[in-house]
Image: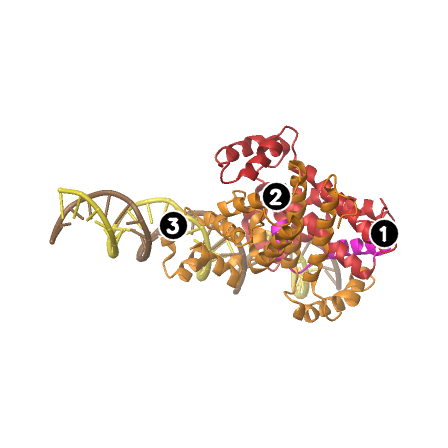
Chain colours: A red, B orange, C brown, D yellow
Amino acid sequence: MLRGAVAVADAAGIGSLTMRSLAQELGVKPMSLYYHVANKDEILDGIVDVVFSEIELPSPEGEWRSEMRRRAASARRVLRRHPWAIGLMESRTTPGPATLRHHDATLGTLRGAGFSVELTAHAYALLDSYVYGFALQEASLPFKGPETVAEVAEPMVRQMSAEDYPHLVEMATEHVLQPGYDFGDEFEFGLSLILDALTRSIPGNDPSAR
Amino acid sequence: MLRGAVAVADAAGIGSLTMRSLAQELGVKPMSLYYHVANKDEILDGIVDVVFSEIELPSPEGEWRSEMRRRAASARRVLRRHPWAIGLMESRTTPGPATLRHHDATLGTLRGAGFSVELTAHAYALLDSYVYGFALQEASLPFKGPETVAEVAEPMVRQMSAEDYPHLVEMATEHVLQPGYDFGDEFEFGLSLILDALTRSIPGNDPSAR
DNA sequence: TCACGGTATCGTACTAAGTACGAAAGTGCT
DNA sequence: AGCACTTTCGTACTTAGTACGATACCGTGA
């Protein structure tokens, strides 16, 4: 049932996920859903947890940077597949089991890498902020892939006077509208910068450590 | 009118912002609103822009790090005051004038600090990801201030077995539940780390530059 | 003063969505 | 067959967005 809800939300947006549309998807009548859940909120909580369950767990066995990198890349992919999940996270405050398991695995990997409890808290807040924030930005872009950038951004830039927004216009014409531009490529830069800086922050680490 | 909508959303959540509740807030009847806006979506777009207008603009005159710091702190404060804005950003893809002005000022400050167009894009994506993501995490916390952490987190930890989530329990008991803990304090760590690393990334900068 | 064209407000009413309530319709076990 | 438990539904009430057309208000020029 939660799978069905995710499918509906993926296909037509979270706004189109109604008890009736979900019932239809499942080949059942609306009121039948209420045998399995108390209300719609429970479904929303549930699909957030489903989304978390799709994110690859980091392993305490692996090298922490590559594990964090894998987790981050996976999280970004998942949130790109389910963009509505980002907005939902803000309102749902009761984490499900998959969410808890995910957090536990991530914390464990960092602790295993030698981070103190406090530094782990710092690192985790930082990494998660970056991943979620990046996903949020990707979701709010008017275009969804490198292909459609030009056709969407061009008209916007054209009607936007260079006097009012000189730097926005500069960025658009000299960078965003250049062939080969893909906002997604920015992800790697920030992630590497953060991981490198975190490496340096481990006490006893050589400051010139890769 | 947009101010009224923001007030309603602040007071009782974005879910309680209905054409009827907004009309009541403004002392008019629901249908009167439709003279000023085409539909509710336009109101949602509008209040997102209002939120952006409340964020302090960085100035190209100032030192870029302190300007970015000021902007980030302001953005976080604003998003804490209007947590519903985070979820809205994901669905609204037509930026308003205040939003554009904000982006332009930020880009201008970075460009003025000597960042190339490309590096500016990198830095901006990174900084914004961090700020939005942090705000998103703050919004999804079950507690809203340092005072209520214990009373909310304690019961959660108690029912969460240490076998299933050992690291989560460790983090909770040894860090989060310690007196004086405030998730908001994490903000400074990540922001400084990012700003320092960005400083290093400027070509020609001494790697040991503060 | 009066008629007129915007500007702003409303009343009525239709549609979609969440869900309370209680009735069926299976299903397996004795 | 009879019973208990699980699962599905039909009906109907409530709330929310908004189409449509009717007013009411208000400054301007005749």
Residue found 49% across the figure and 57% down from its top: B6
In the picture of the structure, the residue carrying the numbered disc 2 is: A139
Q: Residues within 10 Å of mark 3 (few under 14, many from 20)?
A: few
The disc numbered 3 marks a residue on which chain? B
Identify residue type, mark 3.
Tyr
A57 left or right of A38 in image: right
Residue A67, given in percent of the width and then of the height, sits at 81, 46
In the picture of the structure, the residue carrying the numbered disc 1 is: A60
Residue B59 colored in magenta in the image: no
Camera-side residue: A48 or A195? Answer: A195
Magenta stretch, residue numbers: A86-115
Q: Is residue A124 above or below residue A77?
A: below
Residue B27, given in percent of the width and then of the height, sits at 37, 62
A5 left or right of B2 in image: right
Mark 1 and 2 residues: CB-CB less than 8 Å, in contact? Answer: no
Q: How far apart are the alpha carbons under marks 1 and 2?
A: 31 Å
Q: Main secondary structure of the magenta part?
A: helix
In the picture of the structure, the residue carrying the numbered disc 3 is: B34
Mark 1 or mark 2: whose residue is earlier in sequence: 1
- Residue B206, by quadrant, is top right
Residue A3 seen in the figure: no
Point out the image quarter for the C terminus of chain A. Answer: top right
Identify residue type, mark 2.
Ala
Camera-side residue: D10 or A17? Answer: A17
Residue A101 colored in magenta in the image: yes
Residue A161, given in percent of the width and then of the height, sits at 48, 36
